[in-house]
Amino acid sequence: MRKPILSALLLLTTISGWVIAAADELLVVVEPSLAEIEPRPPGPRVVRLPDMAFTMHIAAQCGAGMQAESASISISDTRHSLGPEALADSAATELVIRIPRQQLAPLTIDNFCLIDTSADDARHLNIADALSAQVSLRCAGENQHSIIYRATPLAIRLRCKTGDDN
């Protein structure tokens, strides 16, 4: 799926709170992913994350006389590649990358989503850089090649399941 041109992505990130890493040649925008967890006993506890899905928007632009050949995305042990058709113009490509829970390290979180807490306690917790995505773009021209790299933090929003959830 195509999204608006680069400037629209920059505006979108400003008003949406998405995490962004930018350069002239490669723009990566990743929406925060939601993970629901069950209430647990008080104290510091290790939280095992469920399978996660990250929606990414990638826009690539190669220098003069060069064309995008491919983009590679890596999160944990999950890899995804985009070919030249997906990178053909300045519009962003949207993709969803699913990360199995077995590839996600547990998080240690104190005093969040506890059993027997009041309804006034926080039911959401944002973790701005729980993971990172490594993205590379390969460009090629008649007699030249280049590769650029970006590391982009991935945000997770934890949501505590409660008895009144729908």
Image (cartoon, grey):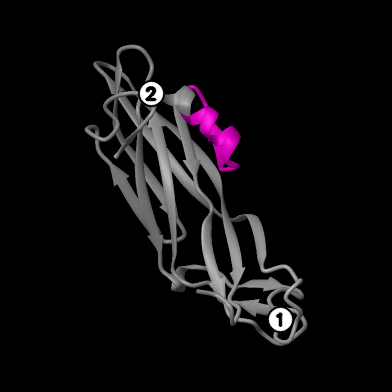
Residue at which label 2 appears = 61
Q: What residue is drawn where x is 44% and y is 25%?
A: 6
Image: 94 above or below 38: above
Which comes before the other along the chain, label 1 or label 2? Answer: 2
Whether residue 31 sits left or right of residue 94 in the image: it is right
Query: Of 161 and 112, which appears nearest the observer?
Result: 161
Regarding residue 25, the answer to whether it shows in the image is no
- Which image quadrant for residue 142? top left
For mark 1, give the secondary structure.
loop
> Where does the magenta region start and end?
9-24
Residue 25 pos. (x, y %): 44, 24
Q: Is residue 37 magenta?
A: no
Q: CA distance from mark 1 to mark 2?
A: 47 Å
Q: What residue is drawn where x is 76% and y is 71%?
A: 120
Q: What residue is drawn where x is 60% and y is 42%?
A: 17
Residue at which label 1 appears = 114
Regarding residue 45, the answer to whether it shows in the image is yes
Q: Where, quadrant-wise, is the N terminus in this rendering? A: top left
Q: How many marks?
A: 2
Residue 83 pos. (x, y %): 25, 38
Residue 164 pos. (x, y %): 58, 78
